[in-house]
Each structure stands twice: as C-alpha cells, then as structure tokens.
Amino acid sequence: MNKIVLAIVGLVSIGILVYALQGGESEEDYTERILKERENIRNFLRGSDESPFASEDVLFKELNYYEPDPAYQVTARLERVEDHKLLTLPTSDGKEEKYIRYGYADFEIDEQPQRLLVLQPFEQQQPPMLFVTFADATSGEETYGGGRYLNVEMPGRTGQKSLKLDFNLAYNPYCAYNPTFSCPLPPQENVLNIPIPVGEKNFDE
C-alpha cells in the first residue's frame, strides 16, 4: 500500500480501533460514535499536511454522508485464501498497486448474499489492517464512481472465521477530492449489484 493509501487508512484508524461494538451499545450510542468519527476525518482533512486539500489548488468543502444505519454493520464469514497470491489493482491515474489476497467475506444485506474480496496491503503498516475497495449500485450516482474504501481490523487470533464490516465507515479515496492522487480501483469481484446507502457520498467540487 503506497503512502497515499496509508494516509487514507489514518483517517479512520481511530474508528477501527473501537470497531468491535461493546455489548449493549444502543443505536443512539452507535450513531454518536459514527458521527464522532466523521468529525475526526473532517478535522484531519482540514488541517493535515497529508490531506488532499493541503494544496492551494483544491478548496476544502464539507463532506457528504448518508445517515448512519446500524443495519449495515455486518459480521461476515471469513474464508481465507490459502495461497495468498498477489493481486495487482489498476489505479485512478493509470498505474498499478499490489495487494495480497487475504480472504473472502460472505454476508447478507436485505437477505441477499454478498461476497467481497478482502486484501492485505503489500507494504506493512502499523497497526496492521485489512483493506476492502468496493463499488455498488450507488457508485457514479450518489457516491464516488471509482468506488469507496473500508478498513477492516485484522483478526486477533489464528483460525478466526469472521470479520466485522461496517459500511457506515465507508469513505472516499483521496482522488475523489483531488485528481492528482493515485487510488486503487475495486476488482470486478467487488462490484456489488445492490445499493449500499450508508457511509460517504459524492464530494461536491
């Protein structure tokens, strides 16, 4: 994972560290936590030298989000990929970026089975994270046409057979704000045919 995507990981690392819901978390507490994470992202983008808005050529504007919906946090069945082959993804600027196939996350949304390929960054990072880039039926309409990203907490134990995915934490790659950035595009197998109407929406340039 290149430095740009590592910076993107930093946007939601705080949310991922508290990703696993505590027993008995109410819908109100969950919504408050998601809104707090969005505020952290906003503050990072407004003030960090690593922000795509650090350039004087790109004006910061408020980010757009769907309302949080706890129904889109799912526990997926993890099917690990045994050979961990490299996967080369095309990027928004015509380049390529390498990842390691980690496994497949199988889950249901609205009683419809879904599957996403989960990737491990080729370059090591701390804390270790898994990565999902996906598109859905909202892509190119209400959400960024190049897809959105999810950071996924690395399983804490050998043999763990599940992953938590919270699509309320889905965020735009930096190239959605500034086209000079290079961002990996979703593999074809991660293009969902259903809408995921949570997380970040299109950025109004």
Image (tube, rainbow, N blue to C red):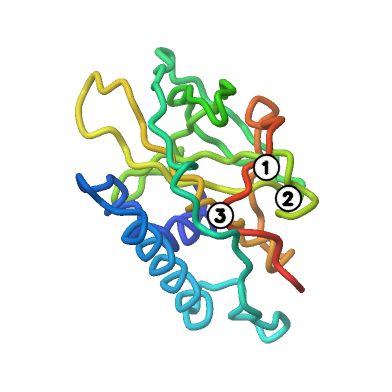
**Which of the two discs, 1 and 2, labels the residue nearer the N terminus?**
2
Instruction: Give the CA distance from mark 3 to mark 1.
Output: 18 Å
- Say which quarter of the image contains residue 159: top left
Q: Are marks 3 and 1 in contact (CB under 8 Å)?
A: no
Residue occupying image coordinates x 58% and y 41% = 133
Residue occupying image coordinates x 42% and y 59% = 12
In the displayed structure image, the side of residue 163 where residue 185 appears, left or right: right
Say the numbered circle drawn on residue 9. none
**Which of the two discs, 3 and 1, labels the residue nearer the N terminus?**
1
In the displayed structure image, the side of residue 102 where residue 175 appears, left or right: right
Instruction: Give the CA distance from mark 1 to mark 2.
Output: 7 Å
Local secondary structure at mark 2: loop
Task: Name the residue type under label 1.
Answer: Leu
Indicate the position of residue 63 as horizontal and vertical percent values.
61, 71
**Which of the two discs, 3 and 2, labels the residue nearer the N terminus?**
2
Q: Are marks 1 and 2 in contact (CB under 8 Å)?
A: yes
Few, some or many residues within 10 Å of mark 2 (<14, 14–19, 20+): some
Indicate the position of residue 62 as horizontal and vertical percent values.
62, 77
Say the numbered circle drawn on residue 92. 2
Task: Name the residue type under label 2.
Answer: Ser
Residue occupying image coordinates x 57% and y 28% = 87
Local secondary structure at mark 1: loop
The vertical placement of 3 against 59, above or below, is above
Instruction: Give the CA distance from mark 3 to mark 2.
Output: 21 Å
- Say which quarter of the image contains residue 65: bottom right
Pointer 3 residue: 199
Pointer 1 residue: 185
Between marks 3 and 1 in the image, the one whose residue lies nearer the viewer: 3
The vertical placement of 151 against 67, above or below, is above
